[in-house]
Amino acid sequence: MKKIFKKIGFLLGSASLIVACSEFEEINVDPTAASASQVQVEYFIDNSIVGAQQNPHISERVFELYWTDAGRMQVVGTLSEGYHSDGWTGEYYKYVSGWLKNANNAIKIADEQLETGSAKVYTGNLKQIARIWRAYLLSEMSDNFGPVPVNGFQGVNPDYNSVEEVYTYVLAELKEATSLIDEGITNDGLANWDPAFGYDYTKWIQYGNSLRMRLAMRLSEVAPTIAQTEFEDAARGGVYISTLDDTFQVAENNGWDDITGVMTRQWWDHFLSATQNNLMIGLGGVPSIDQLPATMHGNVKDANYMGLKFDDHFTTLTNDPSAGFWFDGLHNSIDPRAYDAYVVPGDFDNANYNKYPSWSPNWTSTTERDLIIGDADNDENGETDDISIEAAFTWNAPVAGSWADKGSNNKVKSWGGAIPRLAHKYRNGANKRVFFGPWETYFLIAEAAVRGWDVPLSGQAAYEEGINQSFAYNGVSSHIAAYLTSENYNRVGTSVSWTHTIEPPATVTMNYVDGYTGVAGTYEFKYPENTIYEGGSVKNDLLTKIITQKFIAQTPWLPLETWNDHRRLGLPFFENPAIENLIDNSPNLTLGNYMTNSVNVFPQRLKYPSGLTNSYPQGYEQAINHLGGDDSVFTPLWWAKH
Amino acid sequence: MQAQTVTGTITDATDGSPLPGVNVIIKGTANGVSSNFDGIYSIDVKTDNAILQFSYMGYTTQEISVNGKSKINVALVQSAESLDEVVVTALGIKREKKSLGYAVQEVDGSALTQSREANIANALTGKVAGVQVVKGSNGPASSSKIVLRGNSSLTGDNQPLIVVDGIPMDNFTGAANNDFWNPSQDMGNGLGDLNPENIESMSILKGASAAALYGSRAGNGVILITTKKGKESPGLGITYSTSIGFETMGSSPELQNTFGQGSNDIYDETGGSSWGPKIEGQQVENWNGEQVALKSYDNLNNYFKTGINQTHTISFQQQVSNKSSLFTSATYLNDDSKIPGATLERVNLLTRSVSTFGKNDKWTTDVKVQYINAKAENRPLNGVNSSNAFATMYSLPISLDIRDFSEGTNELGNMFWYDPNSQAVNPYWASKNNLSMDSRDRFMLNGSLKYQIADWLTSEVKAGADLYTTNTESKLFGGSPLTSTGRYSLGKNTFIEKNYSALLIAQKDNLFGKFGGGFTLGGNLMSRESSRLSASSGELEVPNLFSLNNGKEKPGVSQGFSERRMNSLYGTMQLNYDGYAFLDLTGRNDWSSTLSKENRSFFYPSISTSLVVTEMIKKNDGDLPEWLNFGKVRASYATVGNDLDPYKLYNSYSIGKDPFGHTTATSNSTLFNSDVKSELIKSIEFGFDARMFSNRLTVDFSWYKSNATNQLIALPLDPLSGYNSEIVNAGDIQNKGFELMLNGTILDNPEGLTWDMNLNYSKNENSIIELTEEVTQRQLGGFDNLSIIAVAGGAYGEIWGTKFQRVDDAASPNNGAIIVDAQGIPMATSEKFKLGNQQPDALIGFSNSFSYKNLSFSFLIDARIGGEIYSGTNRALQSSGNAAATVVNGAREDIVFDGVIDDGNGGFAPNTVGVSPQIYWSTLASRSGNLGIGEHNVYDASNVRLRNVTFNYNLPKKWLVNTGIQNAKAGISANNVWLISSHLNGVDPESVYATATNAVGFENMSAPTSRTVFLNLSLSF
């Protein structure tokens, strides 16, 4: 028995060893995690800027599916037709929060280092740069959703602020942060952690000021006094993005990571949009034959030619002024940036002719397509009445929307080889994504001048310099002189010349050919009425000119800004999508009003994601109260046209 | 005449397992001992002519004269009168079932191999009350998930702990990412690595009381698996068995075959849907430019081939000497499934030897080595993306012939497809060019050494490990919409769990008068470590050169590491009175490395009691009705837990690289809280067992209620707080239900026909009593505009989505009518509503087995009653015009939906607007989100199926004389034979989207389920 107890005693002894958990604390420290003392401010800034370049997962959802559509850089029929996906939005909400989080982490770590004395000489500057960048991200998020918190990232669910509070906050942040950067401090060894400017402090100050001008101008309609004060203050010293060298841009690649080009996914067509086409046709009056190689001169049509009319194959249930026609050639004159940013169908030898998707060469190499009449022609039914369209060396941008049977029978309207598509240089991941170019600064100054604000340049000088910068960016500067003085109207009745503000005539008589019969006729072309700008009566005032130029100059990088300008001013003219069938998600567009523009048929914002409604209903309620309307795509933001 | 000591081992005559606690008495005296844990006894006898009496509940008592022998081994035969089962309980201790105060159900190894399921989890379907097997439909190496008595946790996978021969085994399940768009591959489940043929029995410890000794690992129940040991066999002891299986599509969606490719009734050779013209044999130009007659094709049947599964097993088992036994087995399984390209190959080797030695055979060793290699190729790709071959197949226009694309590549080496511009991937191309492989080498080892300290006291030390390495590789060739040059990735996961334990077992009957009792005391040291390394080239530079350094960018590398330990002490105490009243107490204290010092230690007690009423009456000279053979009532209460994963206490930063190769940092997405505690599950259970009519009818009933509190919830935060979620202890999840098992021997004629019938019925109600103060809903899974959530005051696993807009005005004559838009199509609500609940109301298993001489036949019908599922496949088929529902009476007339339309004056008028079926169906399928109006495709998930039919024939012994063959058996078995009743238009409700989530009420374009037929042959030499 004694022996037994001894043995039990031994077991109990070993049991007490079990209870000794001396190593447990050590084991539960993640060996791959870093502590606050191991991380550096620049690691977070870099992460935030690189993240905001949008990897393909998020760029498809936000840049492509939402922004290019709402900003009419291409039309995919999402927001522009009232469509919204909670999934896409939820991802964007999460991503943009992540970028903001890292900007805030940078500021937090900088503050900690400054407090504990472990700061480097440049830590203070990095903090200001993080604040400038955070201001941009906050504005990006707010411009998409509306009310967002300015005081987030404290580890608790934040309070939501109104759009007005957000703008007040970011404008103040930009003013203070730009003033606190010390340009005399070294940035040695830091360049790698700033993909935009390599921590060139001057350029960050320029960006901070230009951004402040952009955001101040956003308030032009709702709070003109604040807009003016902030704008004038930001522009006063002339320290802003004024040359191509100052551009805020980040190099892209073509794989699958954060900096992969936002337009590199091959299944996107990036067709020229009807909106853009109507702005560019005739604008600046530079003849196509001066722009194109001689081989294409034979395809260039007369100035008053409208195209082939196909009533059964091209919808006219839209206020797109080009609707109903197939333009079977090249336009007599067009904005020189058109042929640079988009490539003529059939121009296969052009290095910028985009051949995506590479796995189906037929999509871009075939240019001949049919308009089907009755059933598709074949041997059995003996039909031979389909109309074959050769789309090589033609220039069209069919309107988006619902085409119903006209769409089913029209094999040319959305065929890769038939419609001009964005140049390969923007698709191949070898470009730099522009966040802020010099042209925008100038167009902002021009607009400020038109508003009578006190700015360093005259309206005309700024306007023309904006165009000049944009032409330089597109490599078409040789046409600038003729362009600037042109009084030619584009398809929506706007001309280039600053001094030419005469409104176009109500109608113009154009020639056309009936596509079915070949019979020539005339057509009373009517300039569209942009009823959300000055009641639709003004098409060629200074503001329209500026925003028209700004729209073209922002192509293709800044669809968010073209959307913002349209929401703010109703400029430039955005046509309504076709409604052969009514569009589900855009209930305000009807057969009774499709010729009229109204705010409630254009997308105004993104709905908040369901993740927010489910997990933080109080915050959602705050946000909706600030929004002052339904949480819908059609509720205008505070600064937008109502 | 001298006094002498007689020793020996007492075993079960049928399976050779040792019987502990057998009473050994010298006849005519009160002197006696009982056998120890290993069935070994030792007794001193004084006279040479003494007779030893061996008695044990449930076995026929044997008497053996000593006659000078010092060693007497006894094999006791189970008595027919009172089939008193012995079952394996926690810590592997065999107990008489009647003494248990909780439900334990044991499944015999032969019952598990009957269905020839490669994944043993599937073999449990319908066999055990209270067990739900959730199957993934992902090919031969798909995962299946076992849920015991409902889900107790909001996070984790709610899988029971699997213990093989006393050593826990990692039972990971499913895919790491169950995203709606691009989920990762279903990597199977850990249990699927086991070879069913090596299993002697499985004990399912469903409730907390049964599992309480596993403490914080027992939150989701425990399954104990005992592998085979060598036992005496006639002949050589070698058995060869083989089976060949044929796999075909089980249930497939109902498709229309009257309307061809195109849209708006117009043929389009590149169109992606079947909204084209009526198929009337008309000539059309096909995708290839050829003139062909328009017709419909049975593409699903043409695409899925007949899968072939073959298994070969050679096993050897023998009592090699009177002190040592050996079991070895080798199995090769090859499953070339019905899904083109998807295969599973598995090799299992197992050796187990048990030896007794030392003076009086007081020492025993038991050593097992098990090696597994499981290699799966081309596990199916799921999700809403172009790589999902099933999605492509389901939406393929009816008038296209999939076989036209079987070449995959064209003369240029590129993928070809009917619509050259679509992102879709030719599934044949993918089966040859989008390749993945994973191969797991796994060792499961254990060894134990036992020593009998005294006849009533045994000690045991045990060590064991489960260790595996999984290598993964995937190669995507260029030339398709996925990539023009290809992609490559390579990865490796390792896992090691080690356990060391010691146990002391004491057992003595008639301790004080009629009281008997025992105790066990033990401890365990557990450590677990896993690491992961994976690298991906990204898009390749040189096409189709699969090297990590051939990427356009630098290869991406990711790593993972986690380590945890748990120390435990546990003990049990049993008390019995006169063999009919029993009381068990258990306690376990765990110390976990994953919690803070203050919260690291936690104690899990249990108490259970059982009273054998019939025995009590008999022993107290009462009278029992003739028909009642046995009756017992029981009750128990226990607490168990679930602890935290490693590294979830303290906030930190992570370091990464940007695409330029520069260092980046970020903070984590979850806000950790160092004050959190382990989850606590409290459970109460009552039950009774009865046997009647000479044991021909047995009834076993359990009622239970468990409440899982202190849930470790990652509470969602607004990401603008800096974190996506925060870990808190909160909530109360309740599971309440009952289980009923009925077993009847209807005919019992050993010479003629016997007929056994077995019915399992279980009902579990899984509800959320509380979440947190702030949060009343928590998402278990979200798939675009459909979510599966846990709702406070509601149920676990409610399906929420959009509904049809209806008139909500009790005063209106149209109250409740569906509102349509101007086109005549029902409108959707913008909010989400509860549409159903993924939980079944009841699960039923009904099996019958017949035997007549050498023939046996059995079948199993199982039913899932109640609960709902969202069917994404139905939605996709409706949208593409392939669903049978899109054609009515062979035509597609405009649909005038029976609804009302807003008359613009605050009232409603009946809808009179007709809309084309194409617009109607495709609008409903996309309205309010990618999954359309949720209500439209939520279905009753009830289904009844003939799960399994088997037919076996034992060749008569006389045929085998002089062949060297001891035993020969041939048979046929078929699985998933007939879906007798279901409500998803042919889609199998068992093809759930993802098993690794708790959101299993969702189905979306997975592979169709399979029907398999096996031919089996087994020869013993």
Image: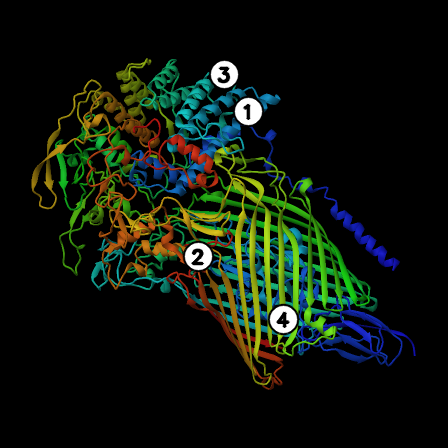
Q: Chain of mark 2?
A: B
Binning the other alpha carbons within 10 Å of mark 1 as few (below 14), some (14 to 19) or many (20 upward) gives many
The N terminus of chain A - image quarter:
bottom right
Amino acid type, residue under disc 1 in the picture? Ala
Q: Secondary structure at mark 2?
A: strand
Of all chains, the one bearing label 3 is: A
Instruction: Let me know if residue B465 appears in the view.
Output: no
* Distance Cα–Cα, label 4 vs label 1: 73 Å
Q: CA distance from mark 1 to mark 3?
A: 15 Å
What residue does disc 4 label? B690
Q: Which residue is mark 3?
A: A182
Question: As shown in the figure, which amino acid type bears the numbered disc 4?
Answer: Ala
In this view, the residue in front, B796 or B849, is B796
Q: Are marks 3 and 4 on the same chain?
A: no
Q: Is residue B417 left or right of residue A321?
A: right
* Left/right of residue A83 with respect to residue B322 in the rendered view: left
Nearer the observer: mark 2 or 3; the answer is: 2
Q: CA distance from mark 2 to mark 1?
A: 53 Å
Q: Give the mark toward the camera: 3 or 4.
A: 4
B86 vs A396, nearest the viewer: B86
Label 1: which residue?
A: A110
Q: Residues within 10 Å of mark 3 (few under 14, many from 20)?
A: some
On the image, the x and y values in percent for residue A195 come to: 45, 28
Residue A211 lies in quadrant: top left
Tag 2 residue: B868
- Mark 2: amino acid: Glu
Mark 3–mark 4 contact, CB under 8 Å? no
Chain where mark 1 sits: A
Mark 2 nearby-residue class (10 Å; few <14, some 14–19, many ≥20): many
